[in-house]
Image (cartoon, rainbow, N blue to C red):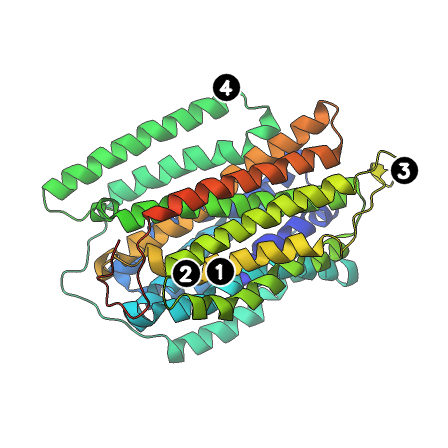
Amino acid sequence: MMDLLDATAMNVAAPAIRNDLGASDAQFQWISIGYLLTFAVLLLAGGRLGDIVGRRRMFLIGLAGFTLTSAACAVAQTPVQLIVARLLQGGAAAMMIPQCVSMIRESFGQEHSAKAFAIFGPFMSLSSAAGPILGGALITYASWRWVFIINIPACLIVYLVALRTLPAGHRPDNRPKLDGIGMILCSVAVGLFVYPVIQGREHQWAWWTQAMMISSVLVLALFALHARTRHRRRLDAFIETSLFRKRSFTGGAVVVFLFFGACSGAFIIYPVLVQLYVGWSPIRSGLTGTWWPVGTIAAMGIGQLLARRSPRLVLQAGILAQAVGMGLAAVTVASNARTTTRQGPDGLLFDTGLTSFNLAPALLIAGVGTGLFFGQFLNLVLSRVDDRELGSATGAVNALQQLGGAVAAAIFSTVIFDQIGRGASPFAASELAYWLCAALLVVTWVSSFALPNIPPTATGKGTD
């Protein structure tokens, strides 16, 4: 929750930080993207290091780093200091986050992991919704520095509790050795892809952004060749290549990438419309968005009951429910569009019939879909993963989640602002983006048939 609260609260806090520190446009962008960049690049490394040095130990190292870098962010006096602290904070989070899923699966086993993941999932949605509200309140009544200060006591409490409660886990004699070359190649490939995806629109997709993305494919191919060579020589690779021979994992990887891409698209469309073009305050926007986690919480218990017979069917119902929510959001936006404008503090604002209550059904239904999905997807994706593969698997799942979000952010931002630049109203641009989200979720639903359909009482040998 601290990771997601921090990342989402920063979306609201960034303008205040820019004004207070006097950041340039380029520095402002790096304050926002630095955390996401190092987090996405180092997630796979964090997962693998958990396999090697122990997941509990790596979690505590990452948590300590997150605490120290949060303090560094809070006391930063210049934009450069804050950028460096944010880069390091993202790296610390990448060491910490993959261990969470791995330790849940390792502690509860295949039989009981589904219940644990059903509790774990909604906290992700809750923190994503609470971040903008918290950020808006802290900026309004205190200072942007409190966005980072509140991490410090929370991290210290978690650290003390973790020392007492987290399982040490087993340290097998044949634990994997670190593949340094593979780690560098994989991290460089992810970085070459993520950076232009995040920054491409700001630079009008200049030739170098396209060259970086092409280079990422070449480096990834080199990494695959390196991993295959190490496998033939019976040496440990940075990523367990056996994962990609398992349909449950490869199919799940596609589903995770697409679903979180659609979620990120929805999270971008809504604040852009209501804050930039309608004039809602960050707090009002955040409070209205809480309809989404309300739906998620409501679906948590229902999903667990329904999953006793067919967890994959529950997950697929969640995907379709979110698609319905996106379609309903498109209809709501279109039916409440207005052409009249008024002068706002930062430019023209559009009058609209949108309210917190007529948006509620769409957000609520989408939240129900998220709850049904979150309760099942981790257990299904990791259903065939061995303990030795857990670090690679959870690092890959988290990395794909971040990559899906980054790609969606680039695509949906481009769609919205390109449509507005061509003369379309913000309502028409948002309606189109919501329909694209719904279409992406339908593709996700089709892809989900690659997942196994394992009842929760299975011992790891369910049927595909």
Quarter holding residue 345? top right
State the residue position of label 4. 207
Residue at coordinates 39% horizontally, 76% vertically from top-left?
A: 163
State the residue position of label 1. 372
Lower sequence index among marks 1 and 3: 3
State the residue position of label 2. 376
Tell me the CA gap for discs 4 and 3: 39 Å
Q: Which residue extends farthest left? A: 233
Residue at coordinates 73% horizontally, 42% vertically from top-left?
A: 333
Point out the frontmost of discs 2 and 3: 2
Q: Where in the figure is residue 56, as x and y percent of width and height? A: 34, 68
Say few, some or many: other residues with alpha carbon within 10 Å of mark 2 (under 14 / 14 to 19 / 20 or more): many
Tell me the CA gap for discs 1 and 3: 41 Å
Mark 4 belongs to which amino acid?
Trp
Q: Name the side, left or right, on which 440 lies relative to 43.
A: right
Tell me the CA gap for discs 2 and 1: 7 Å
Mark 3 belongs to which amino acid?
Arg
Point out the frontmost of discs 1 and 3: 1
Q: Is residue 222 above or below residue 227?
A: above
Lower sequence index among marks 2 and 4: 4
Lower sequence index among marks 1 and 4: 4
Give the structural element (helix, strand or loop) at label 1. Answer: helix
CB of mark 2 within 8 Å of CB of mark 1?
yes
